Image (cartoon, grey):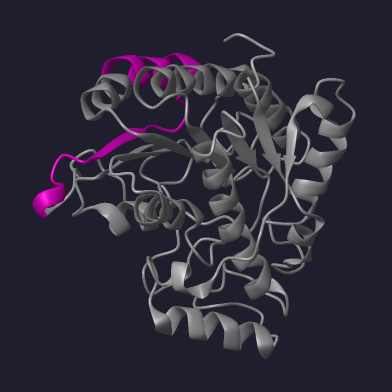
Amino acid sequence: MATGFLYDERFLDHDAGARHPERRERLSSTMAHLQAQDWFGRLRMLTPRVAEETWIESVHSHDLIGRARSACEQELPFLDVMDVGISRRSFDIALLAVGGAQTLADKVITGEVDNAFALCRPPGHHAEHNQALGFCLFNNVAIAARYLQKEHGLDKILILDWDVHHGNGSQHTFEDDPSVLYVSTHQYPFYPGTGAYSETGVGRGEGATLNCPMPAGAGDEQYAQVFVEKILPKIDEFAPEFVIVSAGFDGHVDDPLANICLSTEFYGWMSARLMEVADRHCESRLISLLEGGYNINKLPLCVDEHLQVLAGHKQA
């Protein structure tokens, strides 16, 4: 099994501001840990490309793209809302993160790798059609899903979002589209306020959204139950042609931004279940992109767990 790993030091150039939780040390500490592991060198190293803006427009408005470019050129401190901190290089790095997701999609589709993970920033799942939100400029996974459909001719795409915050942007992008199944586990009620169990899609997309809101304090056992009883049966019914994971690791028990109590090892368990889904339905085709995870000591361990399972170095 060949597992791809995508990283670029340019991702560190996005500066969300002093004391912002979405800081470059999330990536630098994770890379330092991974490079010290004897198995890391056996991964297939991948380099992102800068996404063409036409692909950004497959999900986002021309107005948002223009505002983002202008705000960064003017070196404004934030875009749209105060939690989306930006710097002069942020627009370019956001295009690189989107391009990284597209690179993963290409490499898996062509069979160069079986699955792949992108250690990238800024994250994306909160970004709406016409608004940057929640540390996110552009929605990396949503654009990757549209890219798979339009460039590679796939139809049924699964987005599984295990970030502790609900991916409002991803849900809203596809809520009326039956070709993309959006599944989310997240703390609820919590930021951004969306993600109730009753939100199941609209119009033609009714039933193609599955939210699994979790109460504060929920841990491995409660999450495993939701996977077994709700998530996995729903995915099997949908039978995706490709799996995309919004891989936020901020549900860890020691993460400072939330109140979910997952263990490091449970990220391996969820990874293994999704690999089984990919094996059953879509020739093992799976990519994952970093979203949240703000404890810089525990994030590297969670990414380690995720990658070892993807690469077949660990069973879970």
- How far across and how far down the image is residue 70, in percent? 59, 88
Q: Nearer the viewer, residue 67 or 198?
A: 67
Provide the residue span drawn in magenta.
203-229
Task: Check if residue 295 falls in the magenta segment.
Answer: no
Q: Residue furthest top?
A: 315
Q: Nearer the viewer, residue 20 or 28?
A: 28
Count of numbered circles on the image = 0
Q: Is residue 219 visible?
A: no
Is residue 105 positioned above or below 233 on the image?
A: below
Which residue is located at x 28 percent, y 53 percent? 174
Quadrant where the image shows the N terminus: top right
Quadrant where the image shows the C terminus: top right
Is residue 24 positioned above or below 30 on the image?
A: below
Which residue is located at x 36 percent, y 44 percent? 189
Image position of 275 (left or right of 254):
left
Task: Check if residue 211 falls in the magenta segment.
Answer: yes
Which residue is located at x 18 percent, y 54 percent? 176
Q: Residue furthest right?
A: 36
- How far across and how far down the image is residue 273, in percent? 45, 18
- How far across and how far down the image is residue 269, in percent? 53, 16
